[in-house]
Image: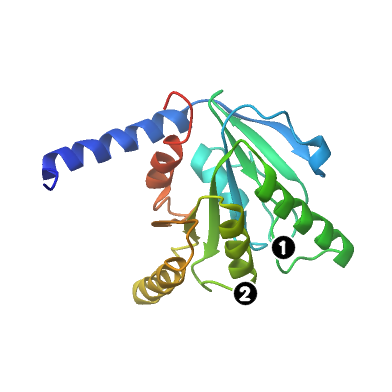
Amino acid sequence: MNEPRVDQDARAALALERGRLLFAGECRFVWAATSLDVLPPAGLPEVAFAGRSNVGKSSLVNALTGQNKLARTSRTPGRTQQINFFEMDGRLLLVDLPGYGYAVAAKDRIAAWTTLVEDYLKGRPTLRRLCLLIDARHGLKDADRRIMTLLDRAAVSYIIVATKCDAPKPAALEACLAAIAAEAANHPAAHPLILATSAVTGAGIDRLRAELATVSIAA
């Protein structure tokens, strides 16, 4: 039997409020790692953000936490070259991963941090959810597909978050999201939920907060 609409609305409102309360709490930078042997001790559940260079990972982290300068942003692809950990109100770690794909850096450095990201995704026991960020202006690229296959093999659950959704026109955005959903349906580790967000307008940020609150302790 279908759940009454009033109950659905109440559950949705409660989820949004939990997300708001979590991200209204203190968020602070706590750790940076350039190799697996210097990762912080496993403890709090972790939500990681991965995506191509310049997809807007740091901007999204800042929008979620309401702190414009928490995660370092840049117009230069590849500026984040280490794994950065941010503690969210003592309940959750947000993990800003280096971007994969094109970056303005030496090839050996790009290879090193790409390997670091892949090793983290495959072997971190406290990683509860991955947000795979896809630029809504461009859709899925081969580098994204490679990461999706890696996540399937490692059985790492992930949701796809479309970023920069304020940029395309509505019809183009709808077509992009539909194409992403069609491909994601073939990946067993992909969560069926695909969120459209904008760090500029704030669109979708409340829904993403609500989703991430479900993996925090004592949510």
Viewer-proximal residue among 172 and 161: 161
Left or right relative to 20: residue 187: right
Q: Is mark 2 on a helix, strand or loop?
A: helix
Residue denoted by label 2 = 142
Taking the image as shown, residue 38 lies to the left or right of residue 102, namely right
Residue drawn at point x = 50 percent, y = 42 percent: 64
Task: Establish if 17 lies above or below 197.
Answer: above
- Measured as percent of width and height from the top left, residue 138 is found at 53, 74
On the image, the x and y values in percent for residue 200 come to 48, 54
Q: Position of residue 122 (x, y in %)?
A: 67, 50
Residue at numbered disc 1: 77
Query: Which residue is painted at 83% across and 63% down in the image?
Result: 105
Marks 2 and 1, Cα distance to the nearest angstrom?
Answer: 17 Å
Where is 219 relative to 120, above or below? above
Percent position of residue 103, x then y = 75, 65
Q: Which colour scheme is used?
A: rainbow
Please state the total of marks drawn on the protein image: 2
Q: How crowded is mark 1: few (under 14 residues within 10 Å), some or many (20 or more)?
A: many
Left of 201 or right of it: where is 114? right
Amino acid type, callout 2:
Asp
Residue drawn at 43 percent across, 35 percent down: 213
Assign a secondary structure to mark 1.
Answer: loop
Q: Image quarter for residue 9?
A: top left
